Image (cartoon, helix red, strand yellow):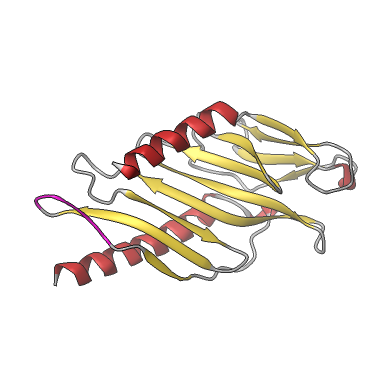
Amino acid sequence: MRILFFYIAALHFFSSVSQNKLTKDIDFDGIPDTIFIDYETAQIVCTLSSKNFKKVKSKTITDLSESSRISKAKNGFYFGNNWMRAGYAAQFRYDKKQKRIRLIGIIRYNLGNATHEGSGESSINLLTGDYISDWHYYDEKLIKIPTITTKMHFKKIYLTDFSEKSYSNFSDKCSKLFYKHKKQLKQ
């Protein structure tokens, strides 16, 4: 029940405060910058005042959903990509030293199949490598796998490097942890 509440709250949050375009000073120079999704090229696009409003683009996001949105984060922005029963939000922040927009976190959710097998959520802080997840599997009833916390490391990913592969690499590692812990519980 708690998980269902989380999903409803998250979907409401992203649908109510998300948009296709965000105007916000993300490079900390006091001048508003613009972040938007270009649905024709399937890319996240930022025009930064510190870069003379030259477009900085992600790689093509092959699984871009029509419901994908950009929303405000305290120190940057979120890119949310949601499908029918699963989705993720990628958090980006301007790296002052590198003068580039960096991916700093990913939150992933899955509602699972009709029995909620594989339902749950996970997140990673890419600055610290801290990973946490709560997943479920079905074995005549829905069983919660104890919260998984571990370290998970990835190379630095900047907006210009970001694509669906950035998310799928994280998702693949999450799946391996899910199956590993599910197998341990069933033994």
The verdict on residue 16 being magenta is no
Q: Residue furthest left?
A: 140
Q: Residue at x 47, y 59 (%)?
A: 170
Q: Residue 129 in the image: x percent, y percent?
A: 55, 68
Q: Residue at x 68, y 46 (%)?
A: 74
Q: Which residues are magenta?
A: 140-145
Q: Residue 181 in the image: x percent, y percent?
A: 27, 68
Locate the C terminus and report the quarter of the image it occupies.
bottom left
Locate the N terminus and report the quarter of the image it occupies.
top left
Q: Residue 15 in the image: x percent, y percent?
A: 52, 28
Q: Residue at x 78, y 45 (%)?
A: 26
Q: Nearer the viewer, residue 151 or 155?
A: 151
Q: Residue furthest front?
A: 2
In the image, taking residue 75 as reference, residue 65 lies left or right, namely: left
In the image, taking residue 26 as reference, residue 119 lies left or right, namely: left
Based on the displayed image, in which of its 4 quarters is residue 177 positioned? bottom left
Q: Nearer the viewer, residue 153 or 16?
A: 16
Number of marks in the rendered image: 0
In the image, taking residue 40 as reference, residue 148 lies left or right, namely: left
Based on the displayed image, in which of its 4 quarters is residue 171 positioned? bottom left
The verdict on residue 141 being magenta is yes
Q: Residue at x 9, y 51 (%)?
A: 140
Q: Nearer the viewer, residue 158 or 186?
A: 186
Q: Residue 137 in the image: x percent, y percent?
A: 22, 54
Based on the displayed image, in which of its 4 quarters is residue 156 positioned? bottom right
